[in-house]
Image (spheres, helix red, strand yellow):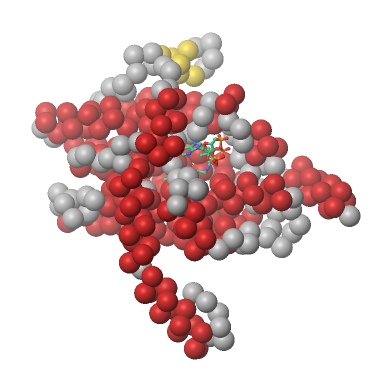
Amino acid sequence: TEAELDAYFEARIAGDQRIEPRDWMPEGYRRTLVRQVAQHAHSEIIGMQPEGDWIASAPSLQRKAILLAKVQDEAGHGMYLYAAAETLGVDRAELTERLVDGRQKYSSIFNYPALSFADVGVIGWLVDGAAICNQVPLCRSSFGPYARAMVRICKEESFHQRQGYELLLRMMEGTPRQRAMVQDAVDRWWWPSLMMFGPPDAESPNTRQSMAWRVKRDTNDDLRQRFVDMSVPQARRLGVTLPDPDLAWNAERGHYDFGPVDWAEFKRVISGDGPCNAERIARRRAAHENGAWVREAATAYATKHGGGRTA
Ligand code: ACO
């Protein structure tokens, strides 16, 4: 019976066993995973845009090669994640439709512009740093395909974070103007990076159930705090100031205190009204439409040679 299946499922979760695609799972669990994994996949693909703009004007061949590799990795991450979502019975084409129609979200962070080459460094340091902080625990997510995709993605994200930090170290050894570019980029990306972890726990509708199902392993606020704690010494080493006058070590808590996040801005950005939302979606939609002939050709080829298996 359904009750027995549910009890078996809950026992497996409690025993920290992985749930695999062929296993029975409650509809809510499936829906939560489709939502989170698809949103994560969309974020990787949309996330190619802010930095992708700099590939053609990177300041050296070496920087161009690094950036190209990084942006290609993000495409790869999107592919692993769409593949993980497909094991839950949804179709990637359908997920893409939901993204370009605005029915599914992607990370708020990618709605901010990359205004200078220092932004490439800061995106690597802070945005990929925040992504690692959020994703390392997801390597222990209860759904097997998602957790396994995370292992590989986190390894590549570490490289992304290091290349960003190394670029910033170089720029900070440069001219006053280069140092000012780095500080300006830090000022613009710091608060949006804190928003990547999602709303405060008290206002997060999904956290409690996702933690109970072990889809998520930590709460939004705990991960945000971990990120602040790890970023402060890195900022000091770099020689930049984080734009928060309330940032201070709290010996009693053993953590850094930080100022209030502008949640009104977060809500505006996730509801479609951030600085670059319209542009990001328009480009994604155009890329999808321009690629239609490739999908049609691949499907026709597969039908002819592969016994009807579609691309
Ligand atoms: N940007 C856009 N939407 C967000 C963000 C954000 N930074 N944070 C939360 N939301 C959305 C949630 O998706 C949810 O909306 P929905 O119910 O319509 O899906 C709503 O705000 C409320 O948030 P929560 O209840 O806290 O949602 P959830 O439990 O899913 O937690 C979180 C959000 C932390 C982002 C979680 O989904 C997660 O860990 N996802 C995997 C990581 C990820 O997607 N990273 C993408 C950016 S990193 C990168 O690509 C480099």
Q: Is residue 88 above or below residue 190?
A: below
Report the front residue among 120 and 33. Answer: 33
| Drawn side of residue 138 relative to residue 266, left or right | right
Residue 300: give x, y in percent of width and height.
45, 83
Q: Foreground residue, 311 or 173?
A: 311
For the residue pair 272 and 262, the one nearer the viewer reads as 272
Instruction: For residue 111, say whether it is visible.
Output: yes
Task: Reply above or below: 270 against 37.
Answer: above
Residue found at the far top of this picture: 252
Image x and y of residue 59, in percent: 14, 49
Residue located at (51% from left, 57% from top): 95
Residue shown at 21% from the left, 39% from the top: 115
* Left or right position of 55 against 243: left
Kindly identify the residue that appears in the image at 87 percent across and 49 percent down: 3
In the picture, residue 261 is in which quadrant?
Answer: top left
Answer whether residue 123 is visible to the viewer in this image: no
Name the image quarter holding the N terminus: bottom right
Does residue 180 appear to the left or right of 226 in the view shown?
left
Q: Is residue 47 above or below residue 236?
A: below
Residue that extends furthest to the bottom in the rendered view of this protein: 304
Q: How many marks?
A: 0
Question: Could you tell me residue 58's position as x and y percent?
Answer: 18, 50
In the rendered image, which quarter is residue 108 located in? top left
**Residue 13 x, y percent position in the rendering:** 74, 45
State the residue at coordinates (57%, 86%): 307
